[in-house]
Image (cartoon, rainbow, N blue to C red):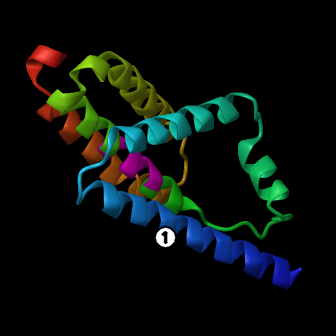
């Protein structure tokens, strides 16, 4: 059981590394439209999975082998992946080269922001809410920087 838990913990660490790598790749060199489409498809897929999974965390952890009370803290993955997603969407939304896609990007951005805020208001843990401080700042400052013409 301990060996299984250690293996799953390694997968969680690798997942976080992947999220951080994507964030670094996307926000240093420019991304291609193909990569942007893949990110949008991944976000849509995640959204669909949420709709059909009533007890998300239990199902996720049980399917990954985490049983009982020993569940990993995935807060860093949660906040890092959402921050990366928001930065990608906001960048795409102001990119003049993607003007023809602004409507669909705006819809995705509104959906992600709405889901994030709806989730945040349900969080009861003070430490969990504090971990979201930078996400809220990112969301609000990027929103304020959007041209009034686009609003």
Residue 90: image location, x then y, percent: 27, 36
Residue 66: image location, x then y, percent: 81, 65
The answer to whether 73 appears left or right of 17 in the picture is: right
Residue 93: image location, x then y, percent: 25, 30
The answer to whether 113 appears left or right of 27 in the picture is: right
Q: Is residue 12 above or below residue 26?
A: below
Quarter location, residue 111: top left
Residue 69: image location, x then y, percent: 80, 66
Q: Residue at x 32, y 44 (%)?
A: 32
The answer to whether 149 appears left or right of 129 in the picture is: left
Location of mark 1 (residue): 17
Quarter location, residue 146: top left
Q: Residue at x 19, y 16 (%)?
A: 151
The secondary element bearing badge 1 is classed as helix
Q: Is residue 85 magenta-colored?
A: yes
Q: Residue at x 33, y 61 (%)?
A: 25
Q: Is residue 1 above or below residue 139?
A: below
Which contiguous range is marked in magenta? 81-87
Q: Residue furthest left?
A: 148
Secondary structure predominantly adopted by residues drawn in magenta: helix
Quadrant of the drawing holding the N terminus:
bottom right
């Amino acid at each position: 059981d301990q060996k299984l838990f250690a293996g799953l913990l390694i997968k969680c660490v690798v997942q976080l590394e992947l999220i951080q790598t994507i964030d670094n790749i996307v926000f240093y060199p420019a991304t291609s439209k193909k990569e942007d489409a893949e990110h949008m498809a991944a976000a849509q897929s995640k959204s669909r999975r949420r709709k059909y999974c009533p007890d998300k965390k239990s199902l996720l952890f049980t399917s990954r082998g985490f049983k009982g009370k020993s569940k990993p803290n995935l807060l860093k993955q949660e906040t890092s992946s959402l921050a990366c997603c928001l930065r990608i969407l906001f960048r795409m939304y102001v990119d003049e080269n993607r003007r023809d896609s602004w409507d669909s990007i705006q819809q995705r951005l509104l959906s992600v922001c709405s889901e994030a805020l709806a989730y945040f208001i349900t969080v009861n843990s003070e430490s969990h809410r504090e971990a979201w401080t930078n996400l809220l700042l990112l969301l609000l400052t990027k929103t304020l920087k959007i041209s009034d013409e686009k609003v």
